[in-house]
Amino acid sequence: SIEDRLVKAMERVQMLEAKRDVAVLKQMPKEKLSVNNEDDVSFLAMKLGITKQDVRVISNTKGDWDRIAKAYRIKPSLVKVVKVAMGAE
């Protein structure tokens, strides 16, 4: 649907922007992580000071990342780190 294509396009643009954000890059782990790996989820949650459930939900939620940050009452930079680290697109 058109809506799905728009959401995917928005995700791609936000991902590209996040990958160029110095504040995000400083917090990035050296290796690629997977939301399906419990150790990766635990590692990122501890590193960012959020819950494992937050990591999973943020990684899987699509749309405006600023709205996601507001909904979970966390900094937009944390949403960016989770999205980039987990390779969500």
Image (cartoon, rainbow, N blue to C red):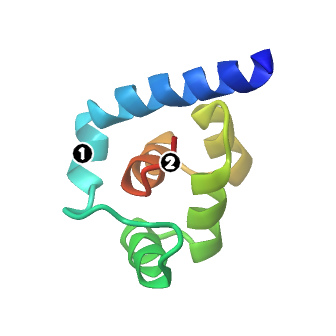
* Residue under label 1: 25
Q: Nearer the viewer, residue 72 or 41?
A: 41
Q: Amino acid at mark 1?
A: Leu
4 left or right, relative to 37? right
* Left or right for 26, reference 88: left
Mark 2: give few (<14), some (14-19) or many (20+) Cα within 10 Å: some
Q: Residue 73: x, y in percent?
A: 66, 51
- Residue plotted at (59% across, 36% down): 65
Question: Crowding near pointer 1: few (<14 within 10 Å), some, many (20+)?
Answer: some
Disc 2 residue type? Ala
* Residue 25 falls left or right of residue 81: left
Residue placed at 43% from the left, 33% from the top? 15
Left or right side of 81 for 55: right
Q: Is residue 87 above or below residue 35?
A: above
What count of labels does the image hold? 2
Residue 29, horizontal then vertical, whole percent: 25, 62
Residue at horizontal 37 percent and vertical 34 percent from the top: 18
Name the foreground residue: 10 vs 80.
10
Q: For mark 2, what is the residue?
A: 88
Query: Which of the image's four quarters has the N terminus?
Result: top right
**Separation of disc 1 and disc 2 at Cα?**
16 Å
Callout in the foreground (1, 2): 2
From the viewer's perspective, is residue 26 above or below residue 39?
above
The residue at 57%/54% (across/down) is: 59
